[in-house]
Amino acid sequence: MSTRRTPRGRRWGGLLGLAGVIIAVGYPLPFQWSGVIYFQTVGFLVLLYSALGIAWNIIGGWCGQFDFGPMVFFGTGAYAMGAAVKFLGFNPWAGFAAAMLFTVAFSALVTFPITRLRDHYFAIATNAIWLIALPIATNWDLIGGSQGLFIPLGRPEGLLAQLASLQPNGRIKELAFYYLVLAYFALVLLIAGRLEHTKLGYCFKAIRDDEEGAQSLGIHTRVYKVIARCFTAGIYAVGGAIFGMWALSVFPDQVFDINWGIVPTIAVVLGGIGRLWGPVVGCLILVPLSQLISTYLGTGPLAGRGIDLVVYGLLIMIVAAARPQGLLSLPWRRWLGGDPTARAASPAEPP
Amino acid sequence: MQLAQAVLSGIQIGLIYALVAVGLTIIWGLMGMINFAHGELMMWGMFAAWSLAYFLKLDPIVTLVPIGLAAYLVGAAIYRLLMARVQRGEIFTQIFATFGLLLFMQNLANAAFTSDYHFLSNTFLATLFGGRLRVGQMVFGAPQLAGGVIALICFLLLYLLIERTEMGLALRATSEDPEAAALMGINATRMYTLAWGIGAALAAVSGVIVANFFAIFPQVGLPFTLLAYATVALGGFGSIPGTLLAAVLVGVIETVTALFLPPAFKDAFVFASYLFLGLFRPQGLFGRF
């Protein structure tokens, strides 16, 4: 996406951004007031998946590496958080740093050897790491095995104490976690937005566009691939840690679930791969849609028969066939009247 | 003795895996397209065999070929209606689209058959030689053995098709350079349709065979898909003998590992072997690139 904008386009962008911030911050308040916390959880999931999508975009969209196993870092982060809080007595806020550092180190360790592999071979290797980690977590008694790891309940009194130990409970739990994940999402967006236009970001894209070329320019492609995947891993780890604190437990099947890899990936593709806002657009559509469909079609006479997922799958296929380049590749700016040059450039394309 | 038995049953299982994986060799290994719903095609093959056996009392050995032919049409339709359009985008869009296909096929089966386990009993293959074949002190599962033989036949036919016929040459040409192939008068769309048709047919046929000795349920596909992907990569892209050898290796690794470790680790050990091999041969056992 070109960053050059006409003044009119910039005004649109500014308005859109402001509206986005107001909506994101104000979204859970009416539900808090009316007591329908279900929608706060939907918001929580949209933001969490969006942040993971932005993270996956770094290795997948910018660096061009087929990462099929980012969910291993979600689980690692959740387990690192759980273990730090339960066994080492960490405060959860320090637990985030511990989870991130541990997972980034883990990612560097397992990613470097497989950066020799190209394309599909790399994809299977990332997938393999996940499939090895899953049975280890399920059978490792120290971290609870298949019985899961439970984060000890503090039951702190008072709002400040609850926030300090990251265990808000009662009516404010969903609200507090919504804002926590909003802050996490905003931070991830900021970091990724900055990263894209640094030397590091350009190196990632150079590797995607022409690996041999990048190498001949003196870019250590293997090292940069590891760095890119460590960014992805670090963000995933914090996501997993937040999820662990939210659920107050870490179950191997839950935190290593394939959906932590699939949903962000398909959100990236739906929005437009390599675009910063792609996963956000994708998640804003996918997550509420799947919730809505499962609410309306998952109940009634055919409940539990997966009719909702049939429709969901069908919709995914229709979108993929109709616009394989992603939704953000559509000429939105021209439709909104923001960029007159775009209109002049492609008069033939029907709106 | 125990080890020898484990290796032998590993080879048997490996031949079945080979059959599941070979469909993927065509679509993914040869044509470079991603199909996450491969296991779902296999699962529908299983349910098709079960339905025909349950409602029409037809033995799977009879319905094998008709189901394969029907699956060919399904695969061709998937390419024409979905993947041909999806191909215009990035390769990742194929993950997106076939994941939608996976959800669609899996839950359609769930809606039609529920997620209960279904079993085929007293099929021709299951009752062959009274179900067990005893050679010396070793025991073979007769249906698995027969399935392995059918797998080998499929492999031989496919190998001849890809390596020895004009059509196979056109397929390989399209996979290597679609534009140059098009200039030589090869219709790329037709070649991709053909590859998807054959891939789907092989997936369904493997499902029909596996149904003789495996529980049939809508979620059965994904573990087979993941294992098949690792098998194809282990064998090397686009190599049919490579897939066969890799699949047998996978089967043997699984059964031998099961002697020493809890069963949950048998697949983990397969994937670990893939990673280990990748350190020395990043292009797989028989890969050309």
Image: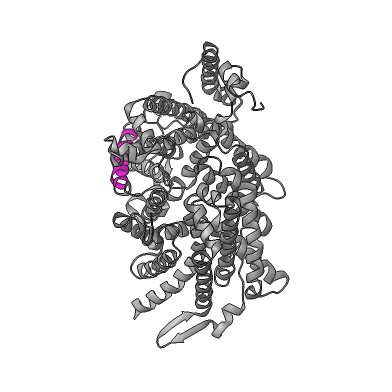
- Magenta stretch in the rendered image: A96-112
Quadrant in which the N terminus of chain B appears: bottom left
Check the image and report above or below for A278 versus B132. above
* Magenta span includes A98: yes
User: Residue at point 42% right, 47% down?
Assistant: A69
* Magenta span includes B56: no
User: Residue at point 67% right, 68% down?
Assistant: B66
Residue sitting nearer the eye, B177 or A10: B177
Q: Position of residue B181 (x, y in %)?
A: 52, 51
Residue sitting nearer the eye, B88 or A237: B88
Tell me which secondary structure the magenta stretch mostly adopts. helix
Q: Position of residue A154 (x, y in %)?
A: 38, 35
User: Residue at point 49% right, 40% down?
Assistant: A265
Q: Position of residue B92 (x, y in %)?
A: 50, 43
Check the image and report above or below for A173 versus B274. above
Check the image and report above or below for B167 versus A345. below
Residue sitting nearer the eye, A141 or A344: A344
Q: Is residue B107 visible?
A: no
Quadrant assignment, res A270: top right
Residue sitting nearer the eye, A16 or B203: B203
Q: Position of residue B248 (x, y in %)?
A: 42, 69
Q: Is residue B172 visible?
A: yes
User: Residue at point 61% right, 25% down?
Assistant: A34
Q: Residue furthest front?
A: B184
